[in-house]
Amino acid sequence: MSTVIEARQLTKVYPMGEEKVHALRGVSFSVRRNEYIAIMGPSGSGKSTLLHILGCLDRPTSGELIIEGTNVLQATDNRLAEIRNRRIGFVFQNFNLMSRATALENVELPLIYAGVRKKERRERAVAVLERVGLADRLHHRPTELSGGQRQRVAIARALVTEPAFILADEPTGALDSKTSVQIMELFAQLHEEGNTLLLITHNQSVAQEAERLIEILDGLIIGDSGQEGVGA
Ligand SMILES: Nc1ncnc2c1ncn2[C@@H]1O[C@H](COP(=O)(O)OP(=O)(O)O)[C@@H](O)[C@H]1O
Ligand SMILES: [Mg+2]
């Protein structure tokens, strides 16, 4: 199956007291396997809201979302959690690592949730940490690592379940420019290796690294370089 994500007319309305915030106002696009997409837009345009919905962390107000052939909005909470834990990898701006746990333990965690046994867990976590260049940092805790190394641990954690796609929300937002370049090189390598990547950014030079650009403004897609007839 080459279509990994199909989003149809997604909307999200947040109630704010008397007011309503229309964070997404009808977003449609699809993602094929091994695409590398940057989603760009100014602050408040709805990028994180979209990422939370695509990641099954939140449900839209209306619309349809199909992930690997499963209509996730009709799925039970258990099924949704299974998709989220096993089929989607997350990378956040602030890494979201467990501070008391070593790099290896952080990366093993999703495999614990997935019920993978200890020996295999360890082997897979070590292998993926080697792939992101941290073979010599397995037993370091986040405070003993640089920002770039922390983000590599988070990327390894996202990869270890062999997800259908990786969602990254401003993954270089907390990094200096030299480290950002190195992390972008790692994403390019992961794309080369066959991974499907969706990366949210408001940084033009980061967005240029992707092969397809989706531009979002006020909760709407205003440009999509991978789709004919949308935007400029
Ligand atoms: N939990 C929430 N409750 C109410 N409003 C929200 C919530 N999350 C986001 N918003 C609003 O929705 C809009 C889109 O936010 P967001 O998706 O975070 O944008 P971006 O990531 O592009 O900066 C903004 O106007 C924001 O204030
Ligand atoms: Mg955001």
Image (tube, rainbow, N blue to C red):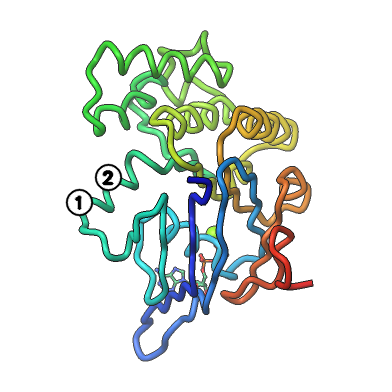
Residue 75 placement (x, y as % from top left): 25, 59
Seen at 54% across and 46% down, the residue is 168
93 relative position to 229: left or right: left
Residue annotated with mark 1: 78
Crowd around label 1: few <14 · some 14–19 · many ≥20 (10 Å): few
**Amino acid on which the number 1 mark rests in the picture:** Asn
Furthest residue toward top: 136
Residue annotated with mark 2: 82
Circle 2 SS class: helix
79 relative position to 20: left or right: left
Seen at 27% across and 11% down, the residue is 119
**Amino acid on which the number 2 mark rests in the picture:** Glu
**Above or below 165: residue 51:** below
Q: Could you say which is closer to the camera, residue 62 or residue 151?
A: 62
Residue 209 placement (x, y as % from top left): 74, 43
Circle 1 SS class: helix
- For residue 157, what is the image quadrant? top left
Furthest residue toward front: 1
Residue 37 placement (x, y as % from top left): 64, 50
Seen at 37% across and 26% down, the residue is 106
Seen at 43% across and 75% down, the residue is 12
Are the residues tagged 1 and 2 within 8 Å (C-beta)?
yes
**Above or below 156: residue 184:** below
227 relative position to 148: left or right: right
Q: Quadrant of the C terminus?
A: bottom right
- For residue 112, what is the image quadrant? top left
